[in-house]
Structure formats: structure tokens, C-alpha cells
Image: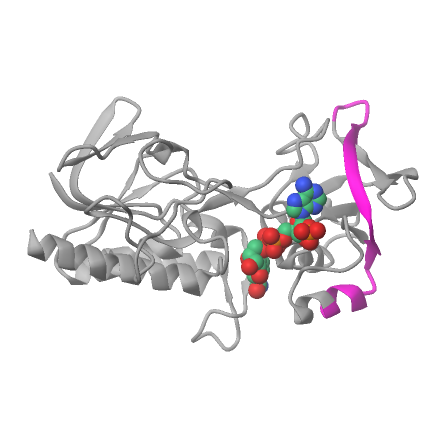
Amino acid sequence: MENIIIIGTGCAGFTAGIYTARANLNPLILEGKQPGGQLTTTSEVENFPGFPEGVDGFSLMDQLRRQAIKFGARVENAFIDRVDFSGETKLLFSGDKKIEAKAVIIATGAAPRLLGIPGEQEMYGGKGVTTCATCDGAFYRDMDVVVIGGGDSACEEALFLTRFCKKVTLVHRRDELRASRIMAERTIAHEKIELLWDSGVEEVLPDEDGKARAIKVRNLKTNEESEISCKGVFIAIGHVPNTSPFQGVLELDENGYLIPRGKSMVKTDLDGVYVAGDCADHVYRQAITAAGMGCQAAIEAERWLAEG
Ligand code: NAP
């Protein structure tokens, strides 16, 4: 049986890995469908303390991984689809595989939210619809693209895409951006970015090859309908927590986030089960806060294991 299993390899998971490894707990970190988590799809991280020049998300996650492994953490690929925490031994299932642990830190993060409109799924991944400018931006060199959303992610994606694309239209459902002031100002001031306010995207329209050629947009104030030609549709409208394996096992809020308990904000109702990062935090959702929660969860787990 494992001492402690950490589910997830984002900032929260690897930080928990560093702390539990340094505490000689020999942690096993399980890597799911997105190794390194959301930061691996971010171009430049400018607000992680200690990097005055910024750091690209992939390098930062690679360094966290190496740091955890250096202290003895093991990283294995296993997507956990079901858990049973009813007994003293915690059971985790990845398909037919069963893993047993004394303690568990859930750091499964969140995944990009989609719009749920016609054409989105059909053209997702390779046919023009994507949620990752860092991954796919270069495919749209000298083309017109749209970014949907009004938060920091949408601004970041739009700004990143200006490096490659001819024109970036940012489509937002309201008439002001939710993004932080610095990101909003940069976005609004950029000569390659056009803002389309008060606009809901209703459909992604295909060309004869089944690839995106335009989006159908409705002005939510005037009800007027229009088409915007674009080869790329970048959706940046927030995230949904990756918590489905814990439904019915741990309490989730109405949006599916795990609900931390107690002053530490990383405990759950179950002894030996802790949460960290975006799967349990819909308020801050930062790399540094996820890392902080990973550290807290590791310390709590370590204390609980020492007592047992
Ligand atoms: P977010 O802040 O939740 O913003 C989501 C945006 O999408 C909002 O503008 C929202 O519109 C819009 N939206 C949501 N559902 C929609 C729908 N169904 N149709 C159309 N639009 C929809 O998410 P985020 O931008 O991913 O940021 C998440 C967190 O990460 C934030 O705390 C952010 O500060 C942080 N972050 C930071 C950085 C950075 O500092 N470099 C970069 C990326 C993200 P409304 O405004 O109308 O609600």
C-alpha cells in the first residue's frame, strides 16, 4: 500500500509532491490526461514569484516535476476514473487497475469550458476550434482568428495570437472585460485586436472541408445577427473542475468544485483525504495559490499520517 497518492501533476500536485517527498513519505504522483496541468498551455507566466523576467508555463512545470522527482517522488501515468474512500484504506481505480493508499491529495485541476454550440465539437481539435493558443496559434499564421471570452485567459490568448495572426477579433458577451486592468488595457490598445462587445456566439460555420470558416454572432442588445470570417476559433470562457470521480464520494458545490473544510482549506470530510488547487478553488485559481494549497495539503497529510 502507498503512504500517499497525489492525483494530478499541475502546480498543486507537484508542490504536494515536493513537500511529501522531502518528508520521506515516498509519494506516488498520478499523471492524468494533461501532464503538467493548465500551465503547460500558457505562454508566459508573469506573476509567479521569483521570475522577474517571466517564465513559460511548460518550463515552470518541468522544473516543478524535476524538483519533486529529485526528492524521491514517483510519477506514474494513471487516469483515475473512480475512487472508494469508504474504508480506512483509500482505493483508487484507473480502469481495471486498483491502487491502495493510506492518504490521498486530490489535485486534479480544471479543464477548459466549452460553449455547447453547433459546430464546436465537430471542428474541435485540428479543424479550427481550440482552447489553447499556445498549442495551436502557430497554425493560424497570417490568418484571421476569433477569441471568445472576456477574462484574463481570453486577453492572454488574443495577445499571444497577435504574434502570428493577421487579425484577432475578441468576442465578449458584455461591454467590459473581466480581465485584470493591465491585461485589459494591453488588449484594448493592441492594433491587431478588434473588440466585439455584447456578442453571443451561436454557431461555428464550416467550409466545404469541414473546417471552420466563420462564426455566427448575435448582438445581445440589438438582436442583430452577423458572421465573422475566421479560420481559428479560440474559446477562453473559463474552466470546469475535474472532479467527476469524486461525485457521491465527497461533497461538491453546484459547479462541481470540491468543498474544502476547516481553517486549512485543504481538508475534506474524510480523514486522510485532502484537496489542492483548481479542483477545489473557484475564487483565486492562480498557479501560486494552487502551489500554496499543495504545500498545505502535504503538511496536513504528513501530520495525519504521523498521528496514525
Ligand atoms: P474567467 O475569469 O472566469 O473569465 C471567463 C470569461 O468567459 C468571462 O469574461 C465570461 O463572461 C466569459 N464566459 C463564461 N461563460 C461564457 C459563455 N457561456 N459564453 C460566453 N462567454 C462566457 O476565466 P479565465 O479568463 O479563464 O481566468 C480564470 C482565472 O485565471 C482568473 O482568476 C484569472 O485572473 C486567472 N488567469 C490569470 C492569468 C494571468 O494573470 N496571466 C492568465 C489567465 C488566467 P463574463 O465576464 O460576462 O462573466
Give the side of residue 170 with respect to residue 2, left or right: right
Q: Is residue 139 among the parts visible in the rendering?
A: no
Q: Image point 30% across, 57% down: which residue?
A: 262
Tell which of 103 and 165 is nearer to you: 103
Q: Image point 76% across, 52% down: which residue?
A: 165
Quadrant of the image containing the N terminus: top left
User: Residue 118 in the image: x percent, y percent?
Assistant: 73, 26
State how many labels appear.
0
Tell which of 147 and 207 is nearer to you: 147
Q: In the rendered image of this protein, does residue 35 appear above or below residue 191?
A: above
Q: Is residue 284 among the parts visible in the rendering?
A: yes
267 in the magenta segment: no
User: Residue 208 in the image: x percent, y percent?
Assistant: 81, 22
Give the side of residue 121 with respect to residue 255, left or right: right
Q: Image point 45% across, 43% down: which residue?
A: 253
209 in the magenta segment: yes
User: Residue 58 in the image: x percent, y percent?
Assistant: 47, 56
Tell which of 25 and 198 is nearer to you: 198
Colour option used = one colour
User: Residue 215 in the image: x percent, y percent?
Assistant: 81, 36
Q: Quadrant of residue 93?
A: top left
Tell which of 48 and 297 is nearer to you: 297
Give the side of residue 238 with respect to residue 96, left or right: right
Instruction: Give the residues in magenta.
Output: 185-210
Q: In the rendered image of this protein, does residue 64 appear above or below residue 259?
A: below
